Image (spheres, coloured by chain):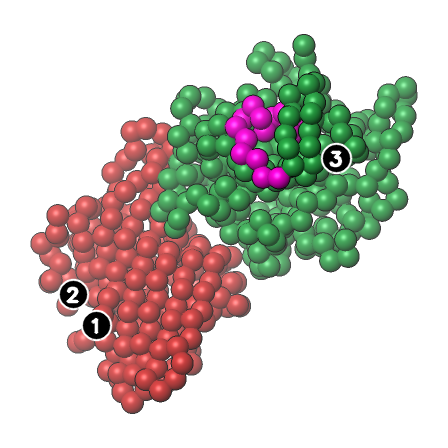
Amino acid sequence: MRIRGAPVATLAALVMAVGLVGLRPARAAFQVHKIAEARFTVEPDKPIFILAMGNDGRPGDTVTRGDALHLLGINPGQGRATILDIPRDTYTAMPGGGRDKINAAHATGGAASQARAVGALVGVDVSFVVDADFQAFTAMVDEMGGVDVDVPFAMNDSFSGAFFQPGRVHMDGTAALAFARNRHIDGGDFRRTEDQGLLLLAGLAKLRAGPHGAADLLRYVSILVRHARLEGLSVVDVYRLARLAASIDPQNVRNVVMPGAGGNAGGASVVNVGPGADALFADFRDDAVLQSH
Amino acid sequence: MRCPSRLAAITVAVAAVAALSGCSDGKSAVAPPGAGPGAIAFTVSGDEVAAAAAPGPRFPDEVRAKVTATLERYLGDAVVGPLRSGRPAGDLGTVFTGPALARINGPDRAALVDEGLPRADDLRADAASARLAALADASGAVTVVAAGVEIRLRTGGPDDVTIVRTGDLVLVADGDGWKIDGYEIRTTRDSAGGEPTTTTARG
């Protein structure tokens, strides 16, 4: 059975991908894209925005959708960051015109199109996209030795396979995927996307605990690059991104979900952007740090 | 393996760096730019290359030479020069990349540049070493070099400040040379009559 909406690669953000020490298969596990019209600077108080995306691709798929959408805003100068979780069904403008669910942008134009849709919604230039599918997500978590996730409440969901007690839980790739997919919980899709943000934080914590020193980080990056397909960026870019990610203490990262409400468009169930979203986006986009939320 | 030219290199100017580059898996020590008698030598070692595609290349001699030259410029322009003159450092644009320089000219300066101390007429080094490791891209070209550094200096004189700087400097190719693009540095300054101060910078 094909499972739609699985937020597979929430963990596919670079912060997590860099932890891929020991990845065995010599194949491109995920992709990192540099978006042409965006700038990459790591300067004090100049935020950088990265879209961490999981697509719903299975082996053989040629058209996939961006079903886990997390916009990472990082403020290098302050050493702080925000994960803005975007529900996949958010009804918004498409890069090519018209309106649709935001995850449809991936199907029509790939990662770059998805980045433009998310960037336009929030009002920022997305510099990079990290894109992974089901297989890549599971492999990444396994290869980094699993992640420790702070499960906020008990989960007992046979659809996703999420069976967890609240508290810190060590998850392998399969368990992390189940945790990320579970939407049979209070809050449904909104809570699920927030849980995906928790996985990102767990990945960042893993990265922080991993490399010790610049030489170690070079080794991590070399392994990462062996298993990534780089689109428009260099190994130096990847190293800079990894260094940036490693500099952020998870304690200084906020994880927030875009406000929204269920609605209907053309007979399809969608998420309409909520009344508080504009203020949240404005707070986020100036320096990637939330002051009033 | 030790480089046979190590001792000789201590007394030569930075132009000798290129000649030392053959010591790919050994150590080399060279004098900083403009150094005269009593010059502080930087000992460089390490040859690990982490590669994006196997088999990885050897640490290229040319890269080692250029990186060493930049490290020497850093030591001379940001550390030894200001200490010996008692004056602020000059333009560090030949040492740091643009983004790094922006941080050096801001909050990270104290950790990487030795300014604001009395002129040191009897500056001595207990240690000045750098251990290199490199990252190569899929074509085998080395694109990033990390230098684990340890610099221990004593200014001498009545104040006799001991300066200990440890951590990593990360260099990338910039034009025809290499510049420092990132760092994680901890610097402690301890004077005879005062409390030690420690500054850190990561960028």
Look at the numbered discs 1 and 2 and tell me whether their residues touch, using CB distance below 8 Å: yes
Disc 1 crowd rating (10 Å Cα; few below 14, some 14-19, many 20+) is many
In the rendering, at what x and y percent does residue A68 appear? 68, 30
Which residue matches tag 3? Answer: A191
| In this view, the mark in front (2 or 3) | 3
Place residue B185 in its image quadrant.
bottom left
In the rendering, at what x and y percent does residue B154 appear? 27, 77
Q: Amino acid at mark 1?
A: Ala
Q: Residue at x 52, y 28 (%)?
A: A172
Place residue A59 in its image quadrant.
top right
In the rendering, at what x and y percent does residue A77 appear? 58, 59
Q: Is residue A173 magenta?
A: yes
Disc 2 crowd rating (10 Å Cα; few below 14, some 14-19, many 20+) is many
Which residue matches tag 2? Answer: B10
Q: Amino acid at mark 3?
A: Arg
Q: Which residues are magenta?
A: A167-181
Q: Mark 3 and mark 1: span between their CA atoms?
A: 63 Å
Q: Residue at x 86, y 35 (%)?
A: A261
Residue B39, numbered circle: 1
User: Who is closer to the viewer here, B121 or A1?
Assistant: A1
Q: Label 3 is found on which chain of the structure?
A: A
Q: Residue at x 82, y 50 (%)?
A: A279
Q: Left or right of A27: which side holds A289? A: right
Q: Main secondary structure of the magenta part?
A: helix
**What hue does chain A carry in this figure?**
green
Q: Amino acid at mark 2?
A: Ile
Residue B183 appears in the picture as rendered:
yes
Q: In the displayed structure, would residue B26 be above or below residue B82?
A: above
**What hue does chain B carry in this figure?**
red
